Image (tube, rainbow, N blue to C red):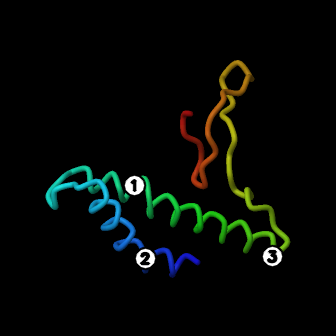
Amino acid sequence: MQAATAEAAEAWVRAAVVYKRLPGDSPLIGEEWITGPYPVLTSLGALTASITALGENRSPVDGFSFGQHLADGSRSASCPTASGTASC
């Protein structure tokens, strides 16, 4: 699925550009990439990683951190990332 999406990505963006009548040098073409093929490919990558982990009898969130311990012992809310945490 990921390979097929990647293969179709340029045609997908080109179709959106033609439909919206964007000039060939428009910076809005980048927006077509970041709202079309890019998030789909990113999501497919995350889905693949999750399915692989489950197939190996692991949790898809192994290694993720979901908050930070503060000096007073409380935890701050944060968004999970594979390499640590990021502010939401």
Quarter of the picture holding the C terminus = top right
Looking at this rendering, what residue extends furthest in the right direction? 57
Q: Which quarter of the picture shows residue 23? A: bottom left
Q: Which quarter of the picture shows residue 29? A: bottom left
Residue 34 tag number: 1
The tag earlier along the polypeptide, 1 or 2, is 2
Q: Is residue 14 above or below residue 20?
A: below
In percent of width and height, residue 58 lies at: 81, 67
Distance (Cα) linking label 2 and label 3: 30 Å
Give the residue number, with chain letter if any, for mark 2. 8
Residues packed near mark 2 inside 10 Å, few (<14), some (14 to 19) or many (20 plus): few
Foreground disc of the pair 2, 3: 2
Residue lying at 33% horizontally and 51% vertically, measured from the top left:
31
Q: Secondary structure at mark 3?
A: loop
- The three-letter code of the residue at mark 3 reads Glu
- The three-letter code of the residue at mark 1 reads Ile
Give the residue number, with chain letter if any, for mark 3. 56
